[in-house]
Amino acid sequence: MGRSRVSTAFRPHFRPEGHFDRSASHKPILVLEGVMKVYRADAPVLRRVDLTVERGEFVFITGPSGAGKSTLLRLVYRAETVDEGRILFCGRDVARLTDESIPHLRRNIGVVFQDFRLVPYWTVSQNVAVALEVMGLSPRVVRSRVALALERVGLDGRGEDLAGVLSGGEQQRVSIARAIVTEPAIVLADEPTGNLDPVLALDILGLFEEIHEGGTTVLFATHDRSLLEVTPRRLIVLDDGRAIEARAGLSALGGALGGTLGPDHGVDIDVRDDELLEAPLH
Ligand code: ADP
């Protein structure tokens, strides 16, 4: 693969350190246009999802288990590819990125998973530093960025501990440090509190809110209704393969989820059409 292909790939939007430059700043950070994902022909997971996320937003994505939340996020960081439609990240169609430019995409997208995905026999620092390895930074710069990321997640001084001995909440903090150490433009969180008790879940949500306050766009997928109630945020409900903007917030949720939250979810499940508005295209 020639060098010229690499240079025309994803780089124009980013400075070499992985930060954004001004040329991309006027575009929505993420646009999904008519996105379809079908694993089984009789039951498409996503059917024509339209969604625009502006830079600096914090967006909850919710819906019952199996609604397609993980699938949607996996499509964004290109662990999967769309069957129809397209996904634009900073104006670039992620399906059309060359293999060489995918690391540029990934460095600008931090991902946090429910199950942490740490290497338990590596130290905390090693688990975080791995995200910087492809960037060719000097060991000194790596050390200082890792230390800064650990400080941001409240794990100052824990860098030499083995990841496997940390509590679940601490392990999730490590994985958040790994997601933000490259200073990505967007962080995707896929049920990041799913393995944690309710108090820790709130702590972790708070951490994402701090990251958001620092200017990072956050897409937070969860089916945990108690988290959605903490702070009013933009809320997208995945319902029958479509992304529905729940402008009425939680009051729209019960109906949109078809009552799948259980009999005691305590909200009015009659949703008026005008309360559920499709996300606008850009
Ligand atoms: P959620 O994150 O909302 O729980 P997922 O995106 O994980 O939902 O899954 C949505 C649907 O797609 C589920 O029915 C799941 O079984 C199916 N699915 C997800 N990934 C695959 C795959 N790689 N192959 C086949 N089916 C899949």
Image (cartoon, rainbow, N blue to C red):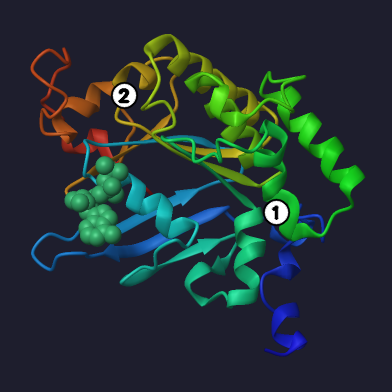
Image height check: is 12 above or below 24?
below
Q: Quadrant of the rendered structure where residue 212 is?
A: top right
29 displayed left or right of 200: right
Amino acid on which the number 1 mark rests in the picture: Ser
Q: Which residue is mark 1?
A: 25
Amino acid on which the number 2 mark rests in the picture: Asp
Q: Is residue 280 visible?
A: no
x and y percent of residue 53 in the render?
50, 47
Q: Residue furthest front?
A: 121
Secondary structure at badge 2 equals loop
Q: Quadrant of the rendered structure where residue 23 is?
A: bottom right
Q: Which residue is mark 2?
A: 224
Secondary structure at badge 1 equals loop
Image height check: is 72 above or below 93?
above
**Lower sequence index among marks 2 and 1:** 1
Residue nearest the viewer, comparing 208 with 196: 196
Q: Residue at x 75, y 23 (%)?
A: 151
x and y percent of residue 73 in the render?
42, 50
Count of all numbered marks drawn on residues in the image: 2
Assign the N terminus to one quadrant of the image.
Answer: bottom right
Residue nearest the viewer, comparing 261 with 158: 158
